[in-house]
Image: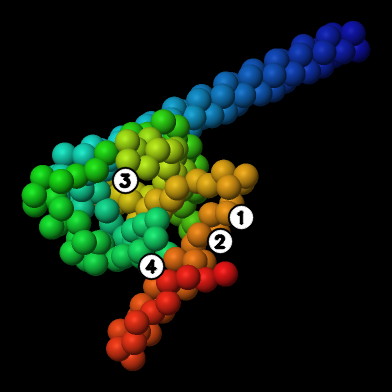
Amino acid sequence: MQLSRFNTLISFMFIITTLTFSACVVAEKNADIKIVASENKERAEVQAIKETLNQFHKAAANANTDQYFQLLSDNAVFIGTDATERWTKQEFAIFVKPYFSKGRGWLYTPVEQNISLLKGAGSSNKSQTTAFFDEILHSESYGTCRGTGVLVKEASGWRIAQYSLSIPMPNALAKDFVKTIKQLALTQSEFQQSAVQNTPPTTEHK
């Protein structure tokens, strides 16, 4: 009688152990499936962002005003290479349209692009709604350039909220280049003062 109970207990424990192991295996497989799905979704988002950036450059090259500005969010900011060039979308349109209306665009070809997705703050599903990027570009006029900025995901897709264009400066040339910038700033300042005072500016500085 006792042996029968013991065998029953052993059989019961075996069944419980088997069920527990099976549940763990299923849970692990489900977790793996979720990870793969998440990775696939992230790759798809990154590809969509790259497509937005590539279309942005293509629109500029084709002087396509409508497409170019549709890829910018309503509150977008564009920062150019000059320290004075910080434009809202509306201000940037005023600068760009005279060029595009004459078919004069500009081509910056992406050489390398790096995309980072941010999780949506306060979102129950923590979906990616914001991304930042940096890209190396090639320009026939300016050589190697860099674009950095932020994109936001809207109902119509990914749109650029900020784009900053710069020309990377080799460290070996930095000091001489900064001197040139200072010289230019000083010369411009003198011309501005001379315009006010109606006196000819000096053009030589030590």
**Distance (Cα) linking label 1 and label 3:** 39 Å
Label 3: element kind: strand
**Distance (Cα) linking label 2 and label 1:** 6 Å
Label 4: element kind: loop
The answer to which of marks 2 and 4 sits earlier in the sequence is 4
Placement of 87 over or under 31, stated as above or below: below
Nearest the camera: 107 or 16? 107
Q: Quadrant of the C terminus?
A: bottom right
**Distance (Cα) linking label 3 and label 2:** 41 Å
Amino acid type of the residue that numbered disc 4 sits on in the rendered structure? Thr
The answer to which of marks 3 and 4 sits earlier in the sequence is 4
Q: Residue 175 bears which disc, if any?
A: 1
Nearest the camera: 123 or 81? 81
Q: Quadrant of residue 78?
A: bottom left
Q: Which residue is mark 3?
A: 158
**Distance (Cα) linking label 3 and label 4:** 28 Å
Residue at horizontal 49%, vertical 66%? 183
Nearest the camera: 83 or 9? 83
Q: Which residue is mark 2?
A: 179
Left or right: residue 194 compared with residue 135: left
Of tags 3 and 4, which is closer to the observer? 4
Q: Which residue is mark 4?
A: 84
Amino acid type of the residue that numbered disc 2 sits on in the rendered structure? Lys
The answer to which of marks 3 and 2 sits earlier in the sequence is 3
Label 1: element kind: helix
